[in-house]
Amino acid sequence: MQELGPFRVNSDGKTLYRNEFAWNRVANVLFLESPVGVGFSYSNSSSDYENCGDTTTAADNYAFMLNWLERFPEYKGRDFYISGESYAGHYVPQLAHTILYYNNMANQTLINLKGILIGNALINDETDSLGRYDYFDSHALVPAEATNQIQELCFYKIDQASLQKDQAKCNEAQDEMERDLEYIDIYNIYAPLCFDQNLTSKPKQMSQVIDPCSDSYTHAYMNRQDVQEAIHANVTKLSYNWQACSEVILFWSDSPETIIPLLRELMENDLRVWIFSGDTDARIPVTSTKYSINSMSLSLKTPWHPWLDHQGEMGGFAQVYEGDLTFATVLGAGHQVPSYKPKSALALVTHFLTGLSLPKKKLLMNKN
């Protein structure tokens, strides 16, 4: 509703408008709510909410895909891609790994996986953390003294393992730094904040760039009884309290420090691996992603260059590594890239699906 889907919610919380740059313009898209408890997803066993983790989520997601393909067999054999953002930097490669494992076990293609696409993704704890504080410093969000203190207390050196020296002092310094950032949107440091969460009596004129108060509009819409009935949400009471961020999950049992070995595995199996990063995100910033990819010590295939959309407008920068890994930035986009730069995001996913490199030059059409 707020990123790549076909509709977005108007400011009245009752009506919708079309997303001109929805990803289902170029592919059939499945939106999967995971882990269990997110959105309208649920379990009949309360223990499932107490023992969530990366492993159980991958298993549930794989079971869903198998069952969905049985329910809709006409889609069996079609090229399949997985995409996600943020913590889906874990979910997506882990589901891909599970698909490969069972394809190999069965000695046949149960799911025709072709590639993954992850954005502003949690990839590697060490470099994700270091890159975040370097981003704060390089974008003048914090004083240099604070960055130096964080590096002194929390990290040894950039080229060594970032083992924490003193956990308590490190945590205190991190908390103090982040208190200074409470007046900006950490997910897009240049985005306006929402100062009026009230719905409007009539839809106001909406643009394709996400409204800073869209959380409120979506929350109201998804909690309408007629909407819940229309989408066949299995709710246990008359008015289910849908939330953008679930509070059902009580304990996360496993989360590996890095998913880089899984990325290598996918590349070794000739899968397309694309990683993109909105460059105004400070939660999992572009510096974190660059550090994470650099730690893989891959050979460069196509050097850093600007990439353009189909109209010749600047989309960001990109480079390609041996093994079919593409890294692309999206200029001016925050953590949720399709929200802030929907046209660039659609151009990005279109090229990902076709396997074509992001263009360096404007594509000219022959009039004849």
Image (tube, grey):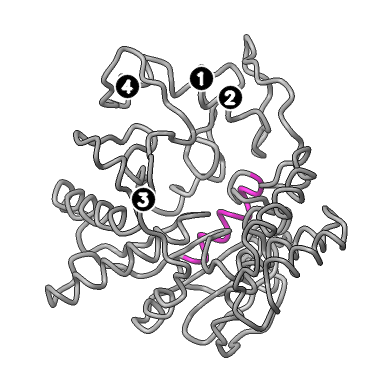
* Residue contact at pointers 4 and 3, CB within 8 angstroms: no
Q: Is disc 4 placed on a helix, strand or loop?
A: helix
Q: What residue would you read off at disc 2? A: 216
Q: Is disc 3 placed on a helix, strand or loop?
A: loop
Amino acid type, label 1? Ala
Q: Which residues are magenta?
A: 340-352
Q: Nearer the viewer, residue 96 or 73?
A: 96
Nearer the observer, disc 4 or disc 3? 4
Q: What residue would you read off at disc 3? A: 28
* Residue contact at pointers 4 and 1, CB within 8 angstroms: no
Quarter of the figure with the C terminus: bottom right
Q: Main secondary structure of the magenta part?
A: helix
Q: Is disc 1 placed on a helix, strand or loop?
A: helix
Amino acid type, label 2? Ser
Give the mark nearer the N terminus: 4 vs 3: 3
Amino acid type, label 3? Asn
Q: What residue would you read off at disc 1? A: 220
Above or below, comparing residue 287 to residue 63 in the picture: below
Q: What residue would you read off at disc 4? A: 230
Give the mark nearer the N terminus: 4 vs 1: 1
**Is 65 colored magenta in this rendering?**
no
Q: CA distance from mark 3 to mark 1?
A: 27 Å
Using residue 341 as the reference point, say whether residue 50 is left or right of it.
Answer: left
Give the mark nearer the N terminus: 3 vs 1: 3
| Residue drawn at 56 percent across, 45 percent down | 21
Q: Position of residue 197 (x, y in %)?
A: 66, 20
Give the mark nearer the N terminus: 2 vs 4: 2
| Residue drawn at 54 percent across, 60 percent down | 121
